[in-house]
């Protein structure tokens, strides 16, 4: 009986889940922008995330891991996720805690989430991005690939919007000009993920 319950739990945990988030809109990109974005998502070995001190790294990982434990019970997977979020966010010039707020709103931290529009993974990246800036081997359910694409796309939108996070988030979600989504991300960021080194 335990095996059956475990098998059902495992199947439910691994099955794609529907996400309530919106979807990025396709916008034609200049060849130079497309080339720059392609270079930005090119895969490289992920080094350890960069922190000012070892103490800051330990404190951040401990605190964020504690906050995320209910949503991601597996400690090893949770730490790998957090290290990857921190690395990819910093690589794109984003606040890792803001990215955690975005992921909370987009997918509820479900790796295999699929929105009604077809957006995939933690950061709900639309498949058209793979055709535009990825390659045929880009799997949007792969942790690092999804976070690399999502952070790169949000950075692209921030650049288009000259640093206006509200408008960049609207573009990311496909709801530019509507306050609900940017407000949800900001709320999750401030209530759940805000952090500063001690």
Image (cartoon, rainbow, N blue to C red):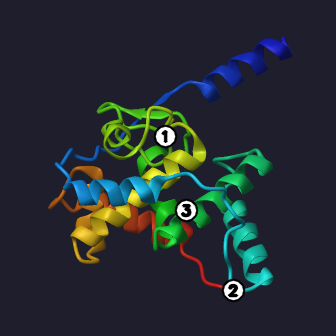
Extreme right residue here? 2
Residue highlighted by disc 3: 88
Residue at the (21%, 62%) spot, across then down:
179
**Quadrant of the frame with the C terminus:** bottom right
- Along the horizontal axis of the image, is 106 left or right of 108? left
Position of residue 182 measured from the top left corner of the image (x, y, whole percent): 30, 63
Position of residue 185 measured from the top left corner of the image (x, y, whole percent): 39, 62
Residue at the (31%, 43%) spot, across then down:
132
Label 1 crowd (10 A; few <14 / some 14-19 / many >=20): many
Residue at the (85%, 17%) spot, across then down:
2
Residue at disc 3, secondary structure: helix
Residue at the (60%, 66%) spot, across then down:
86
Which image quadrant for residue 18?
Answer: top left
Query: Is residue 197 placed above or below 35 in the rendered structure?
Result: below
As rendered, which of 58 and 159 lies closer to the eye?
A: 159
Front label number (1 vs 2): 2
User: Disc 2 and disc 3: Cα gap in Å?
Assistant: 16 Å
The answer to the question of whether label 1 and label 3 lie on touching residues, with beta carbons closer than 8 A, is no
Label 3 crowd (10 A; few <14 / some 14-19 / many >=20): many
Residue at disc 1, secondary structure: loop
- How many marks on residues? 3
Residue highlighted by disc 1: 121
């Amino acid at each position: 009986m335990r095996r059956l319950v475990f098998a059902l739990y495992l199947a439910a945990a691994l099955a794609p889940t529907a996400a309530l988030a919106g979807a990025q809109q396709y916008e034609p990109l200049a060849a130079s922008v497309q080339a720059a974005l392609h270079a930005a998502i090119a895969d490289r070995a992920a080094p350890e995330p960069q922190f000012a001190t070892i103490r800051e790294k330990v404190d951040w990982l401990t605190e964020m891991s504690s906050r995320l434990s209910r949503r991601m019970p597996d400690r090893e997977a949770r730490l790998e996720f957090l290290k990857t979020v921190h690395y990819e966010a910093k690589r794109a010039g984003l606040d890792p805690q803001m990215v955690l707020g975005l992921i909370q709103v987009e997918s509820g931290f479900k790796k295999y989430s699929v929105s009604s529009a077809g957006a995939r993974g933690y950061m709900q990246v639309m498949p058209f991005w793979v055709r535009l800036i990825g390659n045929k081997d880009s799997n949007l359910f792969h942790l690092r690939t999804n976070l690399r694409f999502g952070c790169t796309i949000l950075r692209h939108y921030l650049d288009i919007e000259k640093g206006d996070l509200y408008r960049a988030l609207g573009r990311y979600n496909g709801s530019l000009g509507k306050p609900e989504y940017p407000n949800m991300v900001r709320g999750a960021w401030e209530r759940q993920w805000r952090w500063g080194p001690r």
